[in-house]
Image: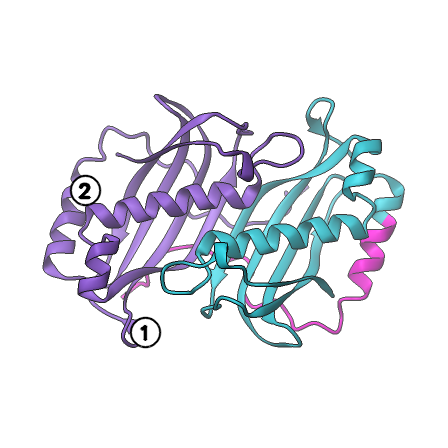
Chain colours: A purple, B cyan
């Protein structure tokens, strides 16, 4: 399920013309915004519903360099959810697909902005999230899930 | 060991005045640059030595909201290294210290930009990295190391 497409902007690259590590996460962050749109938590809805998704935790794997000007797209999968959390997996590809250049799994919490405090998803968001998950069968199985960071054991 | 201080800039916050998830990682990325300076891999040196650090993997935990205009500082610890990789732990605090608002562990690879291909650290960088590690005893023990992302088991 493609959620976001963008060219790699000049302000996202380092002196060497390569995408800086933090800006991979910015692209994934915009993809999460697009996922929110799909489940009825778009910025318009946030203003009216008073809820949003907060990132609790994110893990990123950098697999290949991405250069200035490249057109890229993010594929997003729902790995799981409960009544107030959703576990997403994003992968970054050249536009049109092919090998993943980066991947990020993320745990997000549905929050009532009036607290702020955690809040259960509405029935409509849950139904849309489940519909989104049912359409992701075409995507490759996630390569980078459940990882722990550590030096290789020699 | 404080490596980086900055105010939270307007372009880093969302519609709600809170630091966007990706920009926590940008602040940590600048702290990694500052660490590189400390071990003799500053941008000037990169031009002459032809080597740099590439991020292989990063994990971030979001612990507290950070607001526009806040002055923040990053504390950086070397968790471990081998001849070509270094495992860093960054934590984000209000200027002057206090509770961590976010933390990130990262695995970085020393790369010869002419390949690009992985390359052993020089003797001077290794010596400086060890000196850096010896000065970090004053910092709190890392709270967020070795984590796996997953929904709570009910």
Front one among B116 and B8: B8
Q: Main secondary structure of the magenta part?
A: loop
Q: Secondary structure at mark 1?
A: loop
Place of residue B46 in the rendered image (x, y in percent of width and height, measured from the top left): 78, 36
* Quadrant that contains the N terminus of chain B: bottom right
Q: Is residue A154 above or below residue B18?
A: above
Please check the rendered image and state whether residue B138 is part of the magenta-colored stretch, yes or no: yes
Front one among A121 and B81: A121
Q: Is residue A101 above or below residue B107?
A: above
- Label 1 crowd (10 A; few <14 / some 14-19 / many >=20): few
* Quadrant that contains the C terminus of chain B: bottom left
Place of residue A19 in the rendered image (x, y in percent of width and height, measured from the top left): 55, 35
Question: Mark 1 or 2 closer to N-term?
Answer: 1
Please check the rendered image and state whether residue B2 is part of the magenta-colored stretch, yes or no: no
Place of residue B125 in the rendered image (x, y in percent of width and height, measured from the top left): 84, 45
Front one among A144 and A31: A31
Left/right of residue A62 with respect to residue A143 in the rendered view:
right
- Look at the image and give the residue range highlighted in magenta: B127-154
Left/right of residue A41 with respect to residue A63 in the rendered view:
left
Place of residue A11 in the rendered image (x, y in percent of width and height, measured from the top left): 55, 39
Q: Which residue is mark 2?
A: A132
Q: Which residue is mark 1?
A: A116
> What is the chain letter for disc 2?
A
């Amino acid at each position: 399920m493609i959620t976001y497409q963008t060219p790699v902007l000049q302000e996202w690259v380092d002196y060497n013309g390569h995408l800086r590590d933090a800006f991979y996460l910015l692209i994934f962050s915009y993809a999460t915004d697009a996922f929110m749109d799909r489940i009825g938590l778009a910025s318009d809805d946030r203003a009216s519903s008073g809820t949003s998704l907060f990132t609790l935790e994110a893990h990123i794997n950098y697999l290949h360099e991405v250069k200035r000007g490249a057109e890229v797209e993010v594929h997003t999968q729902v790995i799981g959810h409960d009544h107030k959390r959703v576990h997403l997996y994003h992968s970054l590809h050249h536009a049109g697909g092919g090998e993943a250049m980066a991947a990020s799994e993320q745990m997000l919490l549905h929050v009532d902005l009036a607290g702020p405090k955690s809040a259960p998803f509405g029935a409509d968001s849950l139904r849309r999230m489940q519909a989104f998950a049912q359409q992701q069968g075409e995507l490759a199985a996630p390569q980078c899930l459940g990882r722990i960071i550590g030096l290789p054991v020699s």
